[in-house]
């Protein structure tokens, strides 16, 4: 109660002291000013121009407009044929048809997903010192492209990224969207290396949640809540308590790989099967289950092999190691353990058919760490096994073991290579067994000698300490390896010998087996690097069993924890509840879902203003609010507050359709204006804040890369999947691999994919992309810089890929009737002028067409959209 | 008293929070007028990657000899934590011998015989402190003032604040250890949210093309000297005509200049890397012709040549990332540390002497530093674990009071008694360059960001 009051007072102090800040005012649709324009955007813009004694510029010519709208909506230039079609059409709604076509193109989602990836700092490595690769980051990128191409309602788009795993019934496949929360940097050395409970570890966890919450709030609400980590926000009504309520929302999750189903039916089936597992204990006494289990066990029993011990005749050791045969027919090796050894064990059997042999390696108190091996840690390495039947080798088809050391699996004992072997680390101190199955059943007699040779040549006394050899003629010799030993024993016992506990264990195993068999029939799930509370612990990085306790930290200091924070969001948004009413015992996903719903609420004034401004920003190169991630007092005020609100309300009323918004904007007169200078306007509004003309924008790094490929005809339009690595990599000195961009083959097909599919490596960025202002993915990048530097000029001139592409463009053009004019048409979207053609033809004749192409892709007209 | 809101608003209104200083935004702009008269014109920083052990080099602790082998107990009830080590910490005395040197009588261990001879030129900060005991975070902190990735490093801030001295070379240059990039890879040299032009230009001294993209690829046979000069002329006239159509767009004009500057860089850069003109005496001074010192000597000489040619900020790294072959001496301090000191000791001492004899030390600031120190107790048998509690940095040259030490660590060199943070060091460096660290700020994601965050005091005690 006290906290509620203090938070209320805090809000009050802001709202009473001064007028409510523009971004927090209720969202109401302003009246559209009277004007000669049918598009309300033009009505709002022209009214403010008029007030400032300014006016619209003339429309851009058709060539400029089509090039502009192509780059804007799909990130690629129009072909000369597409330009011609547009120039020559007399359809009155040609522009609208063109825009519809571009918005329907799969290229559109690719183009706009890349913008979103800037905002959310998407990359595919952890960042930080130990910058390891995230093999499964890309499904989030594919989800984005799909969602934008399908024009997913914006509310769902928001909810999916914060709590997609909770709404898969409504938004299929949305689990992949939660990759959003995980796509920031992750401090693996602190998270994995440092023990739980230490101060350094707690700091790492607070900072990781800070990354998730500040990304969420900056992205969706353009609010800088992270300023309130140490104190109440200095400028905006965000309290320390609000901040830690947001920390509490993410208190149950970490960034890790998680499985997800794309098809909703699969995911429903899977969650049903997984839920069943929790009820097994209750079901084992159900007579129906018991009956099923026992008939299942009977069937299984018939398949279980019967093992017969080898009647030992001769035991030799190449190192002359002494041995003793124990009463259970096992052989114990004694004395000093040699480095290496080879055992030869011969004997006979009463069986008349052999399908497999079993080698049991057994513990013994005389062995180091109880064995079963003779290495100091009790491990062993069986390099090779060979079986001879009366001196004829018996080929082994396959082998299985109850346990395999990583990289030392049982098949290494039959691969013909002495340097590989079977091992049991770290499961020393326990008996193990392996079964070797012959290619075909072998008929034998009582007189047949069976000789088994066991090579153990790894060194370091990795030898078997105690072993027993058994034989079988059964049809399924390794059937019992598929079930736990305890269960096998129960199955083998007669029905009367089975105690109620045995029956219970059997029923439980039956239920589990059936469940996992059913799970195995489902299509393989996808894997995405996202947030989850369910992952396999690695080192000190362990999932939270329930949401971790988050304390309000005074001054953001880990040493000054105050009361425990409860999940919630901002108190300053009118009409929305700032502390979530969710049951205490609910799972962590409920917290995220509550935040997702809070963000996507139709009354969240920040959310709807934020997105329309972001979209406007990319179309015009500047937002109505020029600080797209900061709608607070320290951000800039909107240049067109009524237009912003009209767009926000109308966009929301249109079901949050981004395609509607794009279309409305690019078909406006405002957007259509030319970029030409007008000194009389410049003197009034130098920065063109009121949009008396269109802004000239430089192509971004990705558009340059993709355009060059489209000119050479080499652009690979394959969509989705793991990212294209446009670098060579080899093992680095530590966790981070050593990358080489400069020596990567410029003709490697990985270069030909669209840039949105380029692998983004956080701490070792592509130097070309970096020189062209591709943002550093360690921070949210709501805007891109457009720098001009000498190093950028050198990169554009000398990057191997670009130089090689200029050769490919030349090859593509050389058979055209007028290659130089064709070059201008494709690169600039217009024919060359007489003097340009003359100068370039001269240059081509002297230095070749490839050099001419290289000059064009370095030219300003190519690099700017006017 | 002015409230912080007023000051911030004032800074914001006066242009991105940097008043009249943000001059280097437009390419080709000249040096700026700083906040006050600078003492230093340029900086060379020598970064020892991995965490140099303070009690084995410049911060002797006789107490450790006394306690050697005993369980470490500060006696204050404070928690003794160690990041990669399990508890039960036994004190480890330094295996090295310390002697006093120079007029100033600085104690230096025998791992640095050459630096010992120049101690009267140096000023030691003996209680540097870091917030973290983790390499990646620690290197970010010393370079950018933050433990998280994505913030601009000091070199980028200086480039942003002061711009270039010469147009022919980048203003901020980094020479990583040829054995590999340090912790955080290129993250330590990033411009973060500052314009890309301010990031460190990485020099790969072992490569034929030490600066990325300096020359056309060798396999492109169609590019000849003539095609290049004709082509650049054609490009210039094309870009010129386009720029004339839109005279108000300064970017288009800047693009033309950027290609001219690139051409000048192609001419001047190779000269920097050609050491054939250096005298035999200089080569000997640095140890250029001895195996162990050759690499660091080469990079120090190139660094000096860059400073001479007008580069503003040079950063040279010793040690790659990863667990070995750097200053991260976990296993055995008595064998691992001398291996590193042997490589850098002579070249660094030579650099200071060389700058002095050329009269450059007066307006060049030399900084020797690392990301944190090491523990007074052992890890395993004879190594030491990370310790952000206290470590040593030294400075020399422009505006620095030579031959003194500032700051005090406790009797074990476990923690600082009076902490000196990277914020204070950065504030002092900016101060010497004529920049008020509180005024050099850029608005990013709702916050006016500074190299010194919300901290930092100029260390006046070490200034002339």
Image: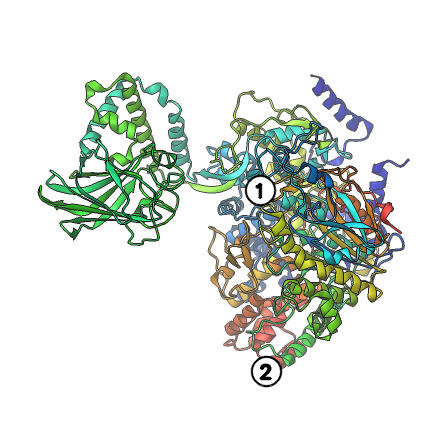
User: Image point 58% across, 67% down: which residue?
Assistant: A802
Q: Residue A806, image x and y in percent?
A: 56, 70
The one nearer the camera, A432 or A443, is A432
Q: Residue A618, image x and y in percent?
A: 65, 50
Q: Nearer the viewer, mark 1 or mark 2?
A: 1
Q: Which disc number belongs to residue B381?
A: 1
Q: CA distance from mark 1 to mark 2?
A: 73 Å
User: Could you say which quadrant of the image residue A701 lies in?
Assistant: bottom right
Q: Residue B145, image x and y in percent?
A: 73, 45
Q: Residue A499, image x and y in percent?
A: 26, 17
How many marks do you count on the picture? 2
Chain letter of mark 1 equals: B
Element under label 1? Answer: loop
User: Image point 12% across, 38% down: which residue?
Assistant: A351
**Residue of label 2:** A845
In-image side of A727 versus A4 (left or right): left
| Quarter that holds the N terminus of chain A | top right
The one nearer the camera, A301 or B361, is B361
């Amino acid at each position: 109660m006290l906290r509620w009051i203090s938070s209320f007072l805090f809000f009050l102090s802001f709202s009473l002291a001064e007028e409510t800040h523009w971004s927090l005012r209720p969202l109401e649709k302003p009246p559209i000013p009277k004007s000669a324009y049918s598009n309300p955007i033009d009505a709002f813009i022209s009214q403010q121009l008029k007030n400032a004694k300014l006016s619209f510029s003339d429309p851009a010519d058709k060539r400029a407009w089509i090039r502009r709208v192509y780059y804007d909506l799909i990130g690629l230039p129009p072909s000369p044929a597409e330009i011609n079609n547009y120039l020559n059409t007399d359809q009155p709604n040609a522009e609208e048809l063109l825009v519809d076509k571009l918005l329907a193109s799969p290229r559109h989602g690719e183009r706009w997903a890349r913008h979103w990836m800037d905002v959310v700092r998407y990359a595919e490595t952890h960042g930080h010192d130990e910058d390891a690769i995230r093999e499964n980051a890309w499904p989030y990128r594919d989800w984005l492209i799909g969602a934008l191409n399908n024009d997913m309602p914006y509310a769902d788009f928001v909810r999916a990224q914060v709590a997609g795993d909770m709404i898969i019934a409504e938004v299929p496949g949305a689990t992949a969207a939660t990759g959003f929360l995980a796509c920031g940097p992750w401090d693996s050395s602190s998270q994995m290396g440092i023990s739980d409970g230490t101060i350094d570890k707690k700091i790492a966890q607070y900072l990781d949640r800070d990354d998730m919450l500040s990304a969420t709030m900056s992205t969706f609400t353009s609010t800088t809540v992270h300023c309130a980590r140490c104190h109440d926000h200095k400028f905006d009504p965000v309290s320390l308590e609000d901040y830690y309520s947001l920390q509490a929302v993410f208190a149950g999750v970490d960034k890790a790989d998680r499985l997800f189903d794309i098809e909703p039916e699969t995911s429903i089936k899977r969650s049903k099967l997984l839920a069943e597992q929790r009820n097994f204990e209750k079901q084992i006494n159900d007579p129906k289950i018991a009956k099923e289990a026992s008939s299942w066990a009977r069937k299984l029993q018939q398949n279980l092999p019967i093992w017969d011990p080898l009647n030992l005749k001769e035991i030799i050791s190449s190192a002359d190691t002494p041995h003793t045969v124990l009463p259970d027919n096992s052989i114990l090796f004694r004395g000093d353990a040699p480095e290496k050894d080879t055992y030869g064990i011969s004997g006979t059997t009463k069986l008349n058919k052999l399908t497999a042999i079993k080698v049991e390696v057994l513990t013994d108190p005389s062995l180091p760490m109880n064995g079963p091996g003779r290495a100091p840690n009790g491990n062993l390495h069986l390099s090779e096994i060979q079986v001879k039947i009366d001196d004829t080798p018996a080929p082994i088809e396959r082998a299985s073991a109850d346990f395999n050391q990583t990289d030392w699996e049982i098949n290494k004992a039959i691969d013909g290579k002495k340097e590989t072997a079977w091992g049991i680390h770290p499961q020393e101190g326990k008996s193990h067994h392996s079964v070797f199955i012959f290619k075909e059943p072998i008929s034998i007699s009582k007189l047949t000698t069976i000789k088994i040779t066991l090579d153990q040549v790894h060194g370091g006394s990795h030898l078997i300490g105690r072993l027993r050899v058994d034989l079988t003629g059964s049809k399924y010799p390794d059937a019992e390896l598929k079930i736990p030993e305890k269960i096998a024993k129960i199955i083998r016992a007669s029905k009367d010998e089975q105690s109620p506990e045995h029956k219970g264990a059997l029923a439980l195993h039956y239920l589990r087996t059936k469940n996992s068999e059913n799970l195995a029939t489902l299509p393989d799930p996808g894997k995405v690097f996202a947030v989850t509370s369910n992952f396999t612990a690695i080192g000190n990085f362990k999932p939270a069993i329930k949401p971790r306790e988050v304390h309000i930290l005074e001054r953001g200091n880990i040493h000054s924890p105050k009361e425990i924070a409860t999940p919630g969001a901002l108190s300053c948004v009118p009409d929305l509840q700032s502390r979530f009413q969710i049951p205490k015992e609910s799972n962590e996903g409920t917290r995220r879902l509550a935040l997702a719903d809070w963000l996507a609420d139709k009354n969240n004034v920040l959310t709807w203003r934020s997105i329309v401004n972001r979209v406007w920003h990319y179309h015009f190169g500047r937002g109505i609010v020029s600080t797209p991630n900061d709608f607070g007092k320290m951000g800039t005020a909107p240049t067109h507050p009524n237009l912003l609100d009209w767009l926000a309300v109308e966009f929301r009323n249109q079901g949050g359709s981004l395609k509607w918004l794009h279309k409305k904007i690019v078909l406006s007169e405002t957007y259509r204006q030319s970029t030409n200078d007008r000194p009389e306007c410049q003197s009034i509004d130098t920065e063109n804040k009121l949009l008396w003309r269109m802004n000239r924008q430089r192509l971004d790094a990705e558009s340059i890369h993709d355009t060059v490929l489209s000119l050479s005809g080499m652009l690979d339009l394959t969509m989705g999947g793991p990212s294209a690595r446009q670098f060579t990599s080899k093992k680095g000195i530590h966790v981070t691999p050593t990358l080489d961009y400069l020596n990567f083959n410029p003709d490697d097909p990985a270069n030909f994919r669209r840039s949105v599919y380029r692998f983004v490596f956080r701490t070792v960025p592509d130097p070309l992309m970096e020189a062209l202002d591709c943002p550093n993915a360690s921070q949210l990048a709501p805007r891109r810089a457009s720098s001009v530097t000498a190093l950028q000029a050198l990169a554009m001139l000398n990057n191997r890929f670009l130089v090689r592409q200029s050769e490919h463009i030349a090859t593509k053009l050389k058979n055209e009737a007028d290659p130089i004019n064709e070059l201008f048409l494709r690169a600039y979207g217009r024919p060359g002028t007489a003097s340009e053609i003359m100068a370039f033809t001269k240059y081509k004749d002297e230095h070749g067409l490839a050099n001419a192409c290289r000059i064009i892709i370095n030219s300003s007209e190519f690099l700017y959209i006017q | 008293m002015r409230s912080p809101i007023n000051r911030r608003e004032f800074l914001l209104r006066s242009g991105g929070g940097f008043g009249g200083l943000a001059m280097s935004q437009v390419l080709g702009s000249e040096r700026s007028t700083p906040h006050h008269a600078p003492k230093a014109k340029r900086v060379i920083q020598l970064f020892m990657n991995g965490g140099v052990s303070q009690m084995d080099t410049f911060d002797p602790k006789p107490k450790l000899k006394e306690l050697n082998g005993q369980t470490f107990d500060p006696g204050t009830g404070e928690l003794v934590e160690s990041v990669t080590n399990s508890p039960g910490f036994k004190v480890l005395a330094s295996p090295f011998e310390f002697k006093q040197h120079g007029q100033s009588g600085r104690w230096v261990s025998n791992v640095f015989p050459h630096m010992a001879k120049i101690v009267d030129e140096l000023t030691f900060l003996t209680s540097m402190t870091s917030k973290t005991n983790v390499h990646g975070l620690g290197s970010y902190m010393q370079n950018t003032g933050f433990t998280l990735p994505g913030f601009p490093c000091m070199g980028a801030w200086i480039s942003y604040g002061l711009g270039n001295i010469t147009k022919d070379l980048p203003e901020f240059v980094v020479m990583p250890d040829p054995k590999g990039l340090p912790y955080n890879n290129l993250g330590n040299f990033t411009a973060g949210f500052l314009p890309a032009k301010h990031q460190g230009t990485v020099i790969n001294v072992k490569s034929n093309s030490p600066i990325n993209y300096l020359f056309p690829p060798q396999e492109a046979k169609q590019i000849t000297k003539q095609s290049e000069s004709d082509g650049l002329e054609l490009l210039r006239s094309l870009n010129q005509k386009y720029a004339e159509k839109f005279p108000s767009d300064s970017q288009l004009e800047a693009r033309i200049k950027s290609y001219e500057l690139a051409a000048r860089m192609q001419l001047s850069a190779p000269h920097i890397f050609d050491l054939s003109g250096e005298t035999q005496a200089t080569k000997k001074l640095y140890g250029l012709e001895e195996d162990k010192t050759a690499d660091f000597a080469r990079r120090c000489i190139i660094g000096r040549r860059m400073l001479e040619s007008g580069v503003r900020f040079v950063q040279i790294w010793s040690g790659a990332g990863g667990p070995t072959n750097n200053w991260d001496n976990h296993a055995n301090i008595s064998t691992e540390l001398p291996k590193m000191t042997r490589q850098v000791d002579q070249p660094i001492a030579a650099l200071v002497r060389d700058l002095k004899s050329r009269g450059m030390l007066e307006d060049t600031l030399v900084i020797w530093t690392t990301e944190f120190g090491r523990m007074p107790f052992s890890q395993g048998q004879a190594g030491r674990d990370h310790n952000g509690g206290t470590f040593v940095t030294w400075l020399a040259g422009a505006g620095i009071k030579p031959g003194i030490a500032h700051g005090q660590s406790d009797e074990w060199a476990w923690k600082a008694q009076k902490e000196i943070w990277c914020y204070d060091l950065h504030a002092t460096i900016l101060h010497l360059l004529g920049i008020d660290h509180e005024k050099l700020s850029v608005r990013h994601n709702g916050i006016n960001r500074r190299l010194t965050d919300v901290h930092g005091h100029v260390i006046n005690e070490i200034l002339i």
